Amino acid sequence: MPTKGEEQQNPPPVDAVRAATRRRLRRSVPRTNRVCPRFSDSEWSVLQHAAEQAGLAPGGYTAAAALAAAASTDPNAAVADYRRGIQELMESNRQLGAVGNNLNQVAHFLNAGGQPVADLRQLLQRVEASIGAVDDAVARMVRR
């Protein structure tokens, strides 16, 4: 271990010191307003990755993203896509509920001795594909 005198004789290179410390410029008047968002583990992971890509700390990245969204010509646009996606999924859920009701009526008819129509298998495949598409959309929304 070097002694105190040896450390003073061999200071680290200036470039190494600059790379290790990254101070942002301070404003003459400190910021007094705060927002303290909370994130799930998966959201935090996504945020850390994005901040790293931008070369910012997560807090700085969050602040920059929030200010950019607020300063845009349409501040609602930042969250509008997500909200629209949620609304569309809710509508899909409503429609699938109606389809489920119709399937119950078909099952009741068949259980009462009715004969299935030729297109029933194709209809059931389309319903299954629709449910799969909604499941995929939900998975995409959750990963956001």
Image: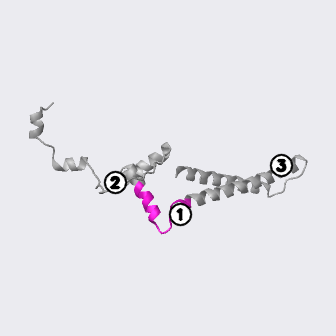
Closer to us: 54 or 27: 27
Along the line of sight, the residue nearer the viewer: 40 or 111: 40
Q: Secondary structure at mark 2?
A: loop
**Residues at badges 1 and 3 in contact (C-beta under 8 Å)?**
no
Q: Is residue 8 above or below residue 117?
A: above
Magenta highlight: main SS: helix
* Residue where numbered disc 1 is placed: 76
Percent position (x, y) of residue 114?
89, 51
Query: Quick one: 47 or 109, which is closer to the camera?
Result: 47
Residue in view at x 44 percent, y 65 percent: 71
Write the residue at 48% across / 69% down: 73
Query: Which badge, 3 or 2, comes first in the chain's sequence?
Result: 2
Find the magenta span and give its range: 63-81
Judging by the rendered image, the residue that carries numbered circle 2 is 30
Task: Name the residue at the bottom extreme.
Answer: 73
Residue that protrudes farthest toward the right in the picture: 113
Mark 3 against mark 2, which lies toward the viewer? 2
* Residue toward you, 39 or 41: 39
Q: Nearer the viewer, mark 1 or mark 3?
A: 1
Q: Is 64 rendered above or below residue 1?
A: below
Inspect the magenta stretch and tell me whether residue 66 lies in it: yes
